[in-house]
Amino acid sequence: MSHNENNHTELVESRIHSNRLFGSLIILGGSILLLFSVIASIHFGAADLSYHAVWSALFDFNSDNSSHVIIRELRLPRAIAAVIVGAALAASGAIMQGMTRNPLADPSIMGVTSGSSFLIAIAFAFLPAISYSGLISFSFIGAGLGAALVFGISSLSKGGVTPVKLALAGSAIASLLSALSTAIGIKYNVSKDISYWYAGGVSGVQMQQLMYVLPFVAGGLILALLISRSISILSLGEEIAKGLGQNTRLIKLLGTIAVLFLTGAAVSIAGMIGFVGLVIPHITRFIVGVDYRWIIPCSAILGGILLIVADIVGRMVNAPFETPVGAVTALIGVPFFLYLARKEGRGL
Amino acid sequence: MHLSKNQHKFKILMIVTSILIVIAFLLSINAGYLKIPMNEVFATLIGQGTPNNELTIFDFRLPRIIMALLVGMGIAVSGAILQGVSQNPLADPGILGINSGAGFAVVLYMFFFQGTAFFTGMLSIFIMPLTALAGAFIAALLIYLLSWKNRTVTPVRLLLVGIGINAAFGAGLIIFQMKMDSIDFMKAIIWISGTIWGTNWTYVWALLPWLLILIPFAVYKARFLDVLRLGDPIAIGVGVRIERERVILLLVAVALAGASVSVGGGITFLGLIAPHIARRLIGARHAKIIPLTAAIGALLLLSADTLGRVVMAPMELPVGLVVSILGAPYFIYLLVKTV
């Protein structure tokens, strides 16, 4: 019996092929690249600061030195925010695609972004005096609400939480909530405020806000890594996963919680940044194969790199105006993504 | 036995939907900023109304209602075809870039040429729809060409390339939108959210031939969608020239959705849910799904448009939003109820 089970496991392992060499390269090289990008992000800006100032601001802080203050108060939080937002979105996108087995799935169909935008729209329309941290809490509550609705509905249904149902319920809820928030925006004439909030990106993020969301991102990433092996198995199909004795319902619940933490945190500090969550996991899969133990960490790193580079480009290209970072990520990523899609053409 | 039962159910569903459409039609004529009582509605329809009512009904309400019916059918059938061809339940006309392409073209046009019209007279009313149509076709063409490799276009590659191109157009959209002033921005948002603004007979005559030809053609081609569902190897095995059929079906879908989006804005959610609703009501045969989808799409869009005119009058709620607010709960109910 147990011998038989071992055989099965081996069979499955062989189907979840991965390219460990490329995976390790991404993690190692990516981390180094990420570090350089953070330094570059601190260096470039309205006033270019010397690398020496960057170094001493980090390790020998002097509150009288104005460039030290700029670095600590403005540039460093922004750089860190870009990295964690990119990493969070990419990792949660990877989880979504693995769980739903659908290449069109991204964090937004989990109801998280639209739930958040719904509550933000309510806040703008009815509580105009709300503070920034109040908005962040609203956004997070909305994210939770959206995810709970989607997961609740799909588990209520006959036949349980199937991937297709999760994806369909998600897109129905997402479009319902975002329609409601657009309607509120139009009715109360706040749609431009809402759009600015969502196209906002990571400028103006403060250290304190980062401290709010950092635990969620860290928790989400750890949870994602813990269930990554189960997600690989789930991505082979519900039947196979069940046949191997997996509690698929539990895994989906945990996956949803991870997505909620990661996307909720990202949305509440950076607004809606599309593309990263959808495309980075695809790019990663093209490179490292279909093992989610590699896909999730590699996606996180690549997502962080993409977003911080896009943020740098976004503030350089049309200075002093900022180009929305979500648009820049798409413009940088699309050509590369198209190249890979044509080259490989593999789905999941 | 089973087949004839299914046939029976199909007939009943079609009759019920048609009756609902007629009811929605009458309500829609009746409702609005100027409320026309039902007896006057009937009087006007048979040619015995006051001149005022005749003007409101024949020049404003009727073309808009017919437009809503046509656009609803077009988007819904396009969605049914795309879900069949791509074999993906999440597919809607948006995946062929039709939304983002048309949206980008319209925003670009609003941004650069706001207030300056090149054409006068008849042509000027066609500028926006033609801009949208051009955008939709360019996006769809780009997606198709980039998915073309080794003389085939696989569904997966089509979806992936679609994601990429959509993201690119979406990014362009955001960039230009953020540079607009508030009034233009609002106009753009309303267009993107989906609004039937072509409320005159010229648009109706422009749209009608597309649908009259393409929807029956789609029904005629429905059996290929059934075969494609079995997977490429089997489809080839039973002698279907899949690549050729796929291209034809895709072209039909693009033409239907492009024509509809050009006068209706971004209402692709209808293209996602209408086919699902039809499938959950009648089963998997496309020869039945497509007509039923068309009827459901028409019904949903007409009801949504009527509601959108009424709830916030004299302001209008974009019909695309109402479709989501109306359609999503019913769709969710069906999801919960069926396996």
Image (cartoon, helix red, strand yellow):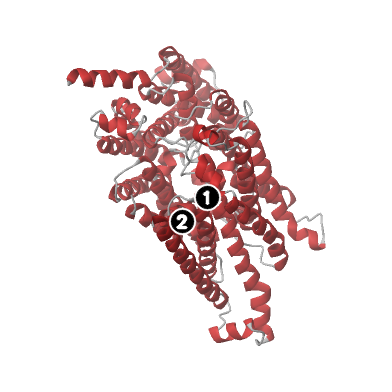
Q: Is A55 rendered above or below residue A185?
A: above
What quarter of the picture does the N terminus of chain A occupy?
Answer: top left
Q: Dot 1 surroundings within 10 Å: few (below 14), some, or many (20 or more)? A: many
Type of the residue with mark 2: Ala
Which label's residue is closer to the chain start, 2 or 1?
Answer: 1
Q: Check the residue under mark 1 and report the chain it is in.
A: B
Residue B267 in view: no
Q: Dot 2 surroundings within 10 Å: few (below 14), some, or many (20 or more)? A: many
Name the residue at 54% across, 84% down.
Answer: B37
Nearer-the-camera pick, B6 or A273: B6
Nearer-the-camera pick, A242 or A259: A242
Residue identifier under label 2: B278
Pointer 2 with pointer 1, Cβ within 8 A: yes
Nearer-the-camera pick, A115 or B102: B102
Q: Is B67 rendered above or below residue A38?
A: below
Residue identifier under label 1: B80
Label tally:
2
Q: Report the residue that reaches farthest toward the top.
A: A21
Q: Check the residue under mark 2 and report the chain it is in.
A: B
Type of the residue with mark 1: Ala
